[in-house]
Amino acid sequence: IYLHNTMMMVGKQLIKILQDFPTISLEQLNATAKFMERIDAKYLVPASDLDAILKKLQNKYYILSINGKHIFQYDNVYMDTADHVFYHQHENKAPSRIKIRSRWYKDSNEAFFEFKQKDGKLIRKRRIPIDLDKHGHMTDETHTFYASLCTSLDMIHTKQSLQATIGTQYNRITLCSKNNDERITIDFNIKLINAHNP
């Protein structure tokens, strides 16, 4: 879910609603509901509807909690070829397309290099941990990881080098169903940032 609002202030009412959810830790979430292969659906909703949506979900979902926090900061840097192959795949709604990104989970202070493939409705994600100072940069390790996945999936981009092109930063709330069969992420305060390799 993406909230249709440029910048949203987090008020006392929202904090109270989030505190009323049963919690799940990051370790528990990764152990039971990692969802590296999944079917995604995206929705754009008014920020004014958020409180009502969350109240309806409280009995069926856990909320991710890290050190008592329920709202987290994400920092993404997207990689692309010199001729922006992946951007054009997305814009043209190609039935099979990929995203390559570096993601910094600021609240857990972890970073990953991620390969995300959309094939019809199915999403497959593969990732490797990276050092924080390598976030937003292509390295020998991430080039090798990317190339090996392209080769295994018989993609034509295997030998093309990548560079940082654009970044996003946002806040996220993560919910996990009590049956461990569904995850809901709610993103807001989304902004674009410049990204480049040195």
Image (cartoon, grey):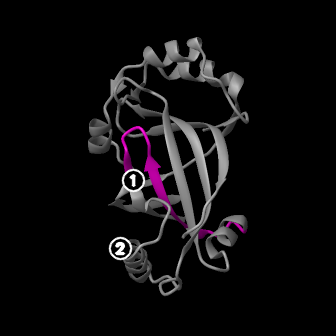
Q: Quadrant of residue 59?
A: top left
Three-letter amino acid code of the residue under disc 1: Ala
Q: Position of residue 105 (x, y in %)?
A: 43, 45
Query: Can residue 120 be seen by looking at this rendering?
Result: no
Q: Position of 118 compared to 36: left or right?
A: right
Q: Earlier in the sequence, mark 1 or mark 2?
A: 1
Q: Residue at x 66, y 71 (%)?
A: 89
Secondary structure beneath dot 1 equals strand
- Please say if the residues under marks 1 and 2 sit with CB atoms less than 8 Å apart: no
Q: Position of residue 140 (x, y in %)?
A: 38, 77
Q: Quadrant of residue 162?
A: bottom right
126 shown above or below 103: below
Q: Position of 22 compared to 78: left or right?
A: left
Q: Position of residue 62 (x, y in %)?
A: 39, 27
Q: Which residues are magenta?
A: 92-110
Tell me, for residue 141, which label it has, or none.
Answer: 2
Q: Position of residue 41 (x, y in %)?
A: 58, 47
Q: Residue at x 36, y 40 (%)?
A: 108
* Separation of marks 1 and 2 at Cα, in angstroms: 14 Å
Counting other residues with Cα less than 10 Å from the Cα at mark 1, is it few (<14), some (14-19), or many (20 or more)?
many
Q: Residue at x 60, y 22 (%)?
A: 10
Three-letter amino acid code of the residue under disc 2: Glu
Tell me, for residue 111, which label it has, or none.
Answer: 1
Q: Quadrant of residue 151?
A: bottom left
